[in-house]
């Protein structure tokens, strides 16, 4: 069973972090409206959970999924990483964040966040 209070707490924390990341991207000249590769990171307790999560993520449009094991990662030693093509603005919208947090919760996993390369050319004067 999913703990809605925990989900909402996780969503709020992600939204707060995302706001800071979006500002950092803008300060560095990044375009938050342009579609780009966004790497998503999840952590699970078991390999079976990681496999099930990766299947769900694939059905939700993520690709280039990988599963790795890190024995020293505490209660969630399995990492699932996937790639989605989206704008940062769309990806960091509250409903999209909640979607990933809920998907993770359905698999007793953690949505750890995202990253994207900044490949914009800085403006010249």
Image (cartoon, grey):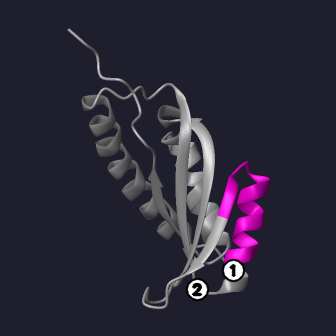
Between 82 and 22, the residue placed more toward the observer is 82
Is residue 82 shown left or right of residue 97? right
Between 108 and 24, the residue placed more toward the observer is 24
- Residue position for label 2: 45
- By secondary structure, the bulk of the magenta-drawn segment is best described as helix
Q: How dense is the environment of label 2, judged by Cα within 10 Å: few (below 14), some, or many (20 and up)?
A: some
Q: Which residues are magenta?
A: 50-65
SS for callout 1? helix
Residue located at (45% from left, 45% from top) = 116
Q: Is 52 one of the magenta-colored residues?
A: yes
Query: How far from the left and from the top, in percent, is residue 95?
Result: 57, 44
Query: How far from the left and from the top, in percent, is residue 67?
Result: 63, 73
Q: Is 115 one of the magenta-colored residues?
A: no
Query: How far from the left and from the top, in percent, is residue 31?
Result: 41, 25
- Residue position for label 1: 49
Is residue 118 shown left or right of residue 56? left
Residue located at (48% from left, 42% from top) = 92
- The dot on residue 94 is none
Residue located at (42% from left, 63% from top) = 9
Q: Is residue 124 above or below residue 118?
A: above
Q: Are marks 1 and 2 in contact (CB under 8 Å)?
A: yes
Q: How dense is the environment of label 1, judged by Cα within 10 Å: few (below 14), some, or many (20 and up)?
A: some
Between 39 and 122, the residue placed more toward the observer is 122
Measured in 3D between alpha carbons, the distance from the residue under mark 1 to the one under mark 2, in whole angstroms, is 7 Å
Which quadrant is home to the N terminus? bottom right
Q: Looking at the rendering, which quadrant does residue 29 occupy?
A: top left
Q: Residue furthest left?
A: 125
SS for callout 2? loop
């Amino acid at each position: 069973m999913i703990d809605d209070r925990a989900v909402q707490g996780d969503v709020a924390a992600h939204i707060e972090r995302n706001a800071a990341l979006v500002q950092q991207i803008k300060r560095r000249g990044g375009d938050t409206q342009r579609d780009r590769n966004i790497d998503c990171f999840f952590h699970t307790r078991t390999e079976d959970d990681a496999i099930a999560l990766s299947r769900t993520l694939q059905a939700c449009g993520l690709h280039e999924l990988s599963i790795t094991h890190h024995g020293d990662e505490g209660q969630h030693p399995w990492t699932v990483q996937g790639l989605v093509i989206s704008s940062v603005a769309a990806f960091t919208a509250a409903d999209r964040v909640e979607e990933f947090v809920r998907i993770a919760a359905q698999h007793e996993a953690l949505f750890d966040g995202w990253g994207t390369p900044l490949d914009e050319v800085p403006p010249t004067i």
